[in-house]
Image (cartoon, rainbow, N blue to C red):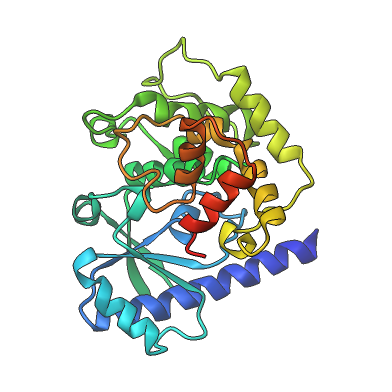
Amino acid sequence: MKNTHKCALLISAVRAAETEIAIGKLLSQGIRCLLVKGISHSRFYPSHIVRESYDVDIAVHPEDFELAKRLEDEGAFAPLLIDLHRGLGNLDRERFDEVFENAESMSIGNRSVMVPKLEDCLRIAIRHWVADGGRHRHRLDDIAYMISAAKASFDFDYFLKKGESLEFFAIPILCAHRYSQVEFDIPEWIPAGLELPISLTGKLEDVWNSTLSYKSLASSKRSLRELGRQVRLRSRLFPIMSLAPDNCDGRFTGSNYTLFGFAQSRGLVAGAGFLKELRNRLGI
C-alpha cells in the first residue's frame, strides 16, 4: 500500500512538472490556454489523497489552436504526455471564452496556471464522466469532492445554462452520492423526488463488475470480430450516454458514440451489416 502511494505521488509530481513546462511554452508564444481535468480537478481533493492523472489536458483557445499544434508537431512538448484540445470540445462546446474569463489561478511549481472555476470544473467532470459512458467509477470521486467543496456561494445560475437539462447534471451527482466513497450532502437544487433509474444503476454495476477489457474502436477496426466485441461491450453503457437531450451541445459530435446512436435509431444490432458500416465510418 505504501509503495502504491509513493508511486502515485511520483506520477503526480511528474505530471506537475510536465504541466509547468508545457504551459510555460504555450504562454511564451502568447497562446491562451486552460489546464483542465486531471490536475485542475485534484485541487478539490484532500491533501493526503493523490488524484492520479494519465496525461496533462490543456484546452487551447480555438483561435490559438493551430499555433499550439504546430509547436507540438515541431516537438516542443516531447517527451511530455500532453493532450491539447481545441477549446473545451465536447466538454463544453462554444464556452471557452466565458470559462477563460472566469478562470482562477492555481500554483504548480513556480508557475501560476489558469484553471476553470468550481462551477465549470463540475460541468466538465460530469460531461467527461457521461462521455465515457460512466465506465470509470473512480471518477465519480471528482464530482463528489467538487460538491463537497461547493459552498453557499455556488453560482447555480452560472452552472446551469438556459435550455440545458437539470437531470443531465443531477443524475451523475446522484450516482456519485451512491457509489463514491466520498460522503457529501446532495445539493438543494437537485429535485427531492429525482431518483436513479434501476435500469441505469444495473447497467453501470454490470460494466464495473465486468472483467472484459476496453480497447479503442480505432485500434479494433481491422478485425470485425474484435470490433463487434467492443461495440457490444459499449452498448451496455448506452443508458448513461442517453441521459442528455439533444440540446446538451456537442456530446455526440466527433465521438464514436454517434455510431451507437446511429445503430439504435435504426434498430440495428452489432451484426455484420452494422459492423461494415461502422468500419466505413472509421475510415477503413
Where in the figure is residue 96, as x and y percent of width and height? 24, 55
> From the viewer's perspective, is residue 220 above or below residue 110?
above
Nearest the eye: 167 or 28? 167
Q: Quadrant of the N terminus?
A: bottom right
> From the viewer's perspective, is residue 214 above or below residue 2?
above
User: Looking at the image, which residue sits at the far bottom?
Assistant: 74
Nearest the eye: 19 or 126? 126
Tally the numbered discs: 0
Residue 110 visible in image: no
Residue beneath the point at 64% across and 65% down: 222
Residue beneath the point at 38% across and 47% down: 121
Where in the figure is residue 213, as x and y percent of width and height? 73, 53
Residue 63 visible in image: yes
Where in the figure is residue 246, as x and y percent of width and height? 33, 33
Left or right: residue 187 compared with residue 120 = right
Residue beneath the point at 32% across and 55% down: 88
Where in the figure is residue 6, as x and y percent of width and height? 71, 67
User: Looking at the image, which residue sits at the far front?
Assistant: 273
Left or right: residue 34 compared with residue 273 = left
Residue beneath the point at 40% across and 20% down: 190
Nearest the eye: 110 or 201? 201
> From the viewer's perspective, is residue 110 above or below residue 242?
below
> From the viewer's perspective, is residue 47 above or below residue 266?
below
Q: Residue 177's image quarter?
A: top right
Left or right: residue 234 compared with residue 241 = right
